[in-house]
Image (spheres, rainbow, N blue to C red):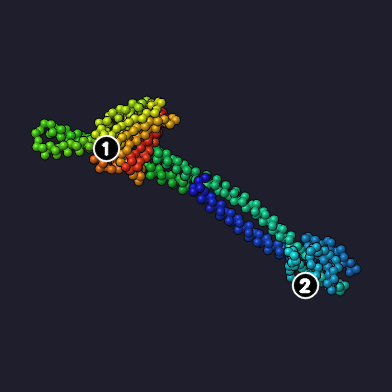
Amino acid sequence: MKIHSIKFKITCWYTGIITLLFGVIFLCALWYLGRYSEEAVSEEIQDEAGDLLENFYGDSPDFPLENRTLFFDDGVMLSVYGEDSEFIDGIFPEDFPEDTPLMGGAMRKVRQQGESWFVYDRKAELSDGQTVWIRGIYSYSSLVTDNLWMLRLMAVLFPLIAVFTGLIGYRMLVKALRPVLLITETANEITSSMTLSRRIPVPMNRDEIYELCRTFNQMLESLEKNFQRERQFSSDAAHELRTPVSVILSHCEYCLEELDLPEEAEDEIKVIQKKARQMSELVSRLLEISRSERKKDSLEKEEVDLILLAESVAEELQEKAEQKEITIEIDDQLKNPVILADMSMMTRLFINLTDNAVAYGRKRGYLRIHMTEEGDQVSLRFEDNGIGIPLEEQERIWDRFYQVDAGHTRGENFGLGLFMVRQIAEWHKGTVSVESRPGRGSTFTVILPRKNF
């Protein structure tokens, strides 16, 4: 149970409230028991004294007063005194002060040396005209013993009740929040796989969880439709732009090669040609993304030799790297360089990461491609000493069309390369991450499984 989870918090509140409630009930019961015990003791002493007095009235006047108190106990010690307070018969506690004066009336407490007793004195006149005092004594320690027993019982039951309440409450919460956990797991799977066609299972009971699941599914359906419309728009726009861009490029080439133009007009056409080529590259990237997204659920798996792939990409981009005097080095530590993957997508992943390092690299810099094995996975590290990426922007570089420093690449990059890298890695059940410091360079790490995707 996580220390800050909702289950933990609600269990603590629930257990605390129930425990506090039981504590108040126990304290009230203990207080009531103490008062009730004193009243019960008072009634018991008076009843026993009355019973003894009735016994005196019921027997013959000639029957001696001695030994009659032996029949009255129930925790009450009875004794009989004459009119002048002389002791006639009875029993009393060993430590009870014998010089305690006889006083008729209400119940009272007598204390001596830390001991306490309830004392009740009653004066009565017998049928023969003789006046006697009847004294009832009840040890206060007996009452305290009963209350201490209740306290000990509370001390044992209290933690047991708290633990039992906490366990029962937690089990109830786990059962009640199980649909929420299922929602969270499904949402995480949808987020990691970017499969918006999945839906959260809806429970049978039409309760709050049912409404929550239904709302989530409606949101996912709306998002899926919006993404589909966006992808369709990108694809349609790229298709529509391809023809006019090709026409612009062909006319620029015709003007530059076939017409005798003034130098100023030729320069202007070259500017148009350069921008048209950039637009053509953007259209090609958008079409490539569109094709990749349609293809992601049916990848063409084949054996891909990563060493040969890295060497071919390095050779393809060597001319562009030489323009900035950037060296491309391949550090191969793979015993088996072959993985099962989609060849075209792996090629695009290597091209995008290599081209990104060259585009944002510094003059006379380097790009080192390290390939190592990690169990059933391979690790690809693209390390450069380029301009680096600020920490606050490192999470955004994976977004479509986002560029850290657009001016540095002179408009040659469109912010789609790293977006495609992450997509390709995830479609192959892999991961991609970045470590970078501004002015010190960046390291992109791609972890890919050999076969299982």
Above or below for 330 versus 25: above
Splitting the image into 4 quarters, where does residue 200 fall?
A: top left
Specify whether residue 202 is in view.
no
How far apart, in angstroms, are the residues tagged by discs 2 and 1?
Answer: 114 Å
Q: Which mark, by number, is residue 363?
A: 1
Q: Where is residue 305 in the image (x, y as percent from the top left)?
A: 36, 26
Q: How many labels does the image show?
A: 2
| Between 71 and 95, the one nearer to me in the picture | 95
Q: Which residue does the image show at 42% across and 41% down from the upper left? A: 188
Mark toward the start of the polypeptide (2 vs 1) = 2
Left or right, 155 with respect to 247, comes to right
Q: Position of residue 344 (x, y in %)?
A: 32, 29
Q: Name the residue under label 2.
A: 103
Q: Where is residue 28 in the image (x, y as percent from the top left)?
A: 63, 60
Q: Which mark, by number, is residue 435?
A: none
| Between 17 and 95, the one nearer to me in the picture | 95
Left or right, 5 with respect to 195, comes to right
Q: The C terminus is located in which quarter? A: top left
| Dots 2, 1 in contact, CB < 8 A | no
Q: Where is residue 255 in the image (x, y as percent from the top left)?
A: 12, 34
Specify whether residue 61 is in view.
yes
Mark 2 neighbour density, 10 Å: few (under 14) some (14–19) many (20 or more): some
Left or right, 57 with respect to 391, comes to right
Q: What element carries label 2?
A: loop
Q: Which residue does the image show at 10% across and 33% down from the upper left? A: 259
Q: In the image, what residue type sits under mark 1?
A: Lys
| Between 278 and 217, the one nearer to me in the picture | 278
Q: Which residue does the image show at 34% across and 32% down from the upper left? A: 369
Q: In the image, what residue type sits under mark 2?
A: Met
| Between 354 and 285, the one nearer to me in the picture | 354
